[in-house]
Amino acid sequence: MAVTAPPSVFAQILDYANRADPYPLYAELRRTPVVRQSDGSYVVSGYAEIVELLHDPRISSEQHGDAAGGLGTGAGLPPAFLQLDPPEHDRLRRIVTRHYGPPHTPDRVDAMIPDLRRTVSGLVDGLAGSPEVDLVDQVAYPFPVTAICDLLGVPRQDEPRFHPWSEALIAALDPGTGDPAERQRRRVSAMKEMGQYFAGLIGTRRHAPGPDLLSALATDQGPDGHLSDPQLLTTAFLLLNAGHETTVNLIANGMLTLLRHPDVLERLRRESELAIHLVEELLRYEPPVQFLPNRTALDDIEIADTTIPSGSRVTLVLAAGSRDPAHVRDPDRFDPDRFDPDRFGLARDTDQHLGFGGGVHYCFGAPLARLETQIALTELTRRLVNPRLVVDPPPYRTNPVLRGPRHLPVAIDGVLPADG
Amino acid sequence: MRLVVDLTRCQGYAQCAFLAPGAFVMQGEGEALLYEPEPDDEQRERVLRAAAACPVQAIVLDRGPVRNGDRPAVPAPRRDGITQDEFLRTGRIVIVGASLAGARAAGALRYEGFRGSLTVIGDESHDPYDRPPLSKQVQEGWVAPGHTGLPRRRAIDADWRLGVAATGLDLAAKQVRLADGTSVDFDRLLIATGVRARPWPVPAEAALDGVFVLRTREDAEGLQRMLAGRPDRVLVIGAGFTGSEVASVCRAIDVPVTVAEAGPAPLVAALGGTIGAIAAEIQRDAGVDLRCGVQVTALEGENGRLRRARLSDGSTLDVEVAVAALGGVRNVEWLEGSGLACGRWGVACDAGCRAFDANGLVTDDVFVAGDVARAPQPLFGYQLLALEHWGNAVSQAEVAAHNMLSDQAHRWPHLDVPIFWSTQFGNEIKSVGVPGVADEVVITQGSVPDRRFVAAYGRRGRLVGAVTVNHATWLDFYRRQIERAAPFPPPWRTVDQPAEAHPVPADFPTHPIPTQDATVVLTGHDPADRRATLLSP
Ligand SMILES: Cc1cc2nc3c(=O)[nH]c(=O)nc-3n(C[C@H](O)[C@H](O)[C@H](O)COP(=O)(O)OP(=O)(O)OC[C@H]3O[C@@H](n4cnc5c(N)ncnc54)[C@H](O)[C@@H]3O)c2cc1C
Ligand code: HEM
Ligand code: SF4
């Protein structure tokens, strides 16, 4: 009779039972910073090794073989730049960036600040009157969704339609739960419906362009060419999805962490600038994207006394790297001032985090996500009167990659009026 | 508020330019980042956001004196082997040279816990300021020449003796003599006197109005004033980095410019002829009148003002402005007779930044850092190299400061692979390793016509350097491969490989640095465990 091996550390991390606190498991994982799994893939958990591989041109983000989970695949669409290597990745990302950030559109994100403030302020107004609120459903989720819709030019009233699509897409990223075939089927059908929706919207925008990103991309003619219609569709899915499923976790993890550290919450009420670098520490301490499961070695790679053979799949465990004691002092301590620019010591003494990845795939939405979270945490801490956690830990989403609370029930004694 | 971007670390993520678009600007189609070193208070919140967001913490800032005072200084983490408390409390340290290396070392000494007396002597009368912007955003007219002050994270508690030169060093008496007739005693000394610009060799011509060099704030002020008047033509003499950057600025502000370069291509000493030819193309595409293999034979004036230049190709050029970008001269004259190993090539030191005396014996109490230092490169046959790079000044300053406070067993070796950057014509050019010793070069990633590529340099089958153009995210990979003595041509399969990757001669004019083959590999991430390991022959 075959004896079943105990589950690997990484398998335990995928196990929902460990979602609320995977960090001890990450510490265990780090004992072998590059470790082979029984399926032949490699899991990388040391900070230095992850940074090295994020910048290693022998690592590919494209799909090789039949690994599942691509955003575009299955619905007859090309992959988005998240899943492409240079030069195509760079070209597509540049085309989108032309209308989103520097060098051509440097003010786009900055100009969103007043609207972001208004949106949060309105959502927090909506918390008034009940003794218990859910910060996920009432603020952390709707806020980034509104922001990404505004950026893209998706009418807000359509949002309820793509919430389930978005869920189906990220469920497909979740290696741990449910029936894989069923997940893929749901994903493909979500993609088809989303495709139809966006095809219609793009048609409208092409005829009557607005100031939004989708209009700009639909009518673009830059030096790098323009996105084909299928590319435009997958890019829109990518942005919408990334805008839906990540910042929600940073805001929710942020409030959860602050409620667990009331002294810091109290400081944030008084020191407006604290929010700026506090967000960096959150990205290190409770990162919304816990690992990147989609890399492949194009060649043999020697790293940490191991050789990752050409063709192997590689998982980069960002959340483990950001708490690597070989790199970060006192890594399991939540230190709100860790990223205070005043504290950057010698050029060599740095506590960088991996929250947004690194290298050419460094998060496209990072400036927006940072602003959203800074603004949301500031507004929530200033206006909620005596907020308390109702349950700790709160219930988590099942997804081990995009990890965060499903609900964050908080008891409050009231809501202060907005400033000015 | 003052800030500086460590562009040797920057990987062009542009987070800063998203979050503080008024203070950080990406230029061109590439990754060329320029910034305002002293942004006004209105920008404060945005600049803080930018600094916190930089993924590689390349932005160093201070929040200005007022707020600085509010914040308790954060002591460095305890390190092993920091010298006995006695010296930390009562020692006397003198730093000569109050620029990048000197100021960084002063900050690092305090950060590492030195509480004794600290004197910083500088012959320029300004607070320490940064030079790289002087040939870039300052000449474009975007940043005032006086606004490139270096940030001090906390007001550094030191006796800043600015505007007075050191004129002599008495090693036996442990004294530095100053131009004002006084002297300062030290227990430990750091020499950080850098270089000055090599002047145009004919003094009478150099003295003409309109003839410039570019090293100091005053040089930058004078040149900027002329450029702001939109002269009919500018002549740049020498197409090294500074000369090329000045030419780039001229084109950016639409001033006609001629570049005369004696060698076969711009940047040829740093990049070789093959990649230099690409630099030439970039210049010509931008409208520079580039003349290679051409020397300026005379500068002629009327009434003390520059009027025209004569070139070795037989032509004359009517110009009001000429910039002599002929490299630097090391500031070592004040050390004459001190008994240290110093000369035109700099002050020689060991990998721990301790100066050698004239016998080649290492001294215990005299350290060197920055452009004036000539230090061994274990990776390259232990050659002594002087590197005039910003990043080198910073890292040597920190190593020197650490070693000034550490016992023998805990000294750090300065084993950083050389890195520098240049921002020109909307491109970010970066170099790692020592391409200058290479015999061959090959494009390994990206596309030359798109001006986004990596060129790898090899010598006798070993990777010795890499140059990126608008591809800085990949630089670290090549640095690590250089440290590991990787083979050349690179055998790897990577993303974005050009269809044909044949090594061609790197085409350095003559090997400026004689060298041998691979001697060591470098290991370790933390400075405390950086090590060079000899390769068996
Ligand atoms: C225009 C320009 C652009 C540059 N751009 C780049 C770039 O893009 N990338 C890059 O990597 N590097 C660049 N550099 C180089 C970089 O600025 C230098 O590497 C750096 O300044 C070295 O710092 P340092 O402190 O060693 O020397 P320096 O900055 O030269 O400072 C030495 C100081 O010592 C003073 N001094 C000299 N003798 C005495 C004395 N006897 N007594 C007292 N004081 C004395 C000098 O006046 C000076 O203030 C640039 C330099 C210039 C001038
Ligand atoms: C706190 C919130 C967020 C976190 C933690 C986060 C994290 C990440 C990470 C780790 C990556 C790297 C993926 C990889 O290397 O494979 C990434 C990429 C990406 N993110 Fe985000 N993200 C966040 C918010 C957003 C938002 C709001 C958007 C949209 C506006 C966005 C758009 C993208 C895109 C398009 C990529 C792909 C980039 C590329 O491949 O070049 N992200 N993100
Ligand atoms: S890496 Fe460079 S471009 Fe990116 S945020 Fe830092 S300083 Fe700015």
Image (cartoon, coloured by chain):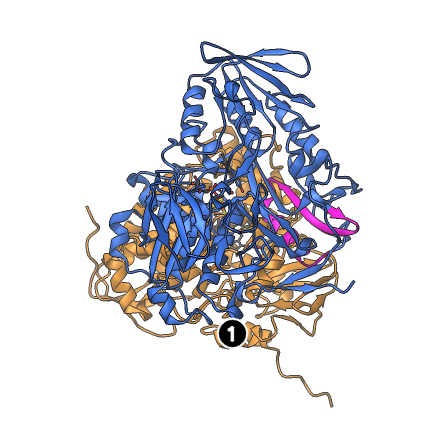
Identified at 44% across, 41% down, the residue is B17
Task: Provide the letter of the chain coloured orange.
Answer: A
Question: Is B476 one of the magenta-colored residues?
Answer: yes
Q: In this rendering, would A199 be left or right of B480? A: left
Identified at 41% across, 27% down, the residue is B141
Query: Which percent across, then down, holds residue B471?
Result: 61, 43
Query: Which percent across, then down, holds residue B48?
Result: 36, 48
Colour in which chain B is drawn: blue
Tell me which segment is drawn in magenta: B458-486
In front: A181, or B81? B81
Question: Is B177 one of the magenta-colored residues?
Answer: no
Query: Which percent across, then down, holds residue B369?
Result: 50, 51
Q: In this rendering, would B358 be left or right of A110? A: right
In front: A5, or A397? A5
Query: Which percent across, then down, holds residue B344?
Result: 58, 41
Label 1 sits on residue: A16
Q: In this rendering, would A89 be left or right of B228? A: right
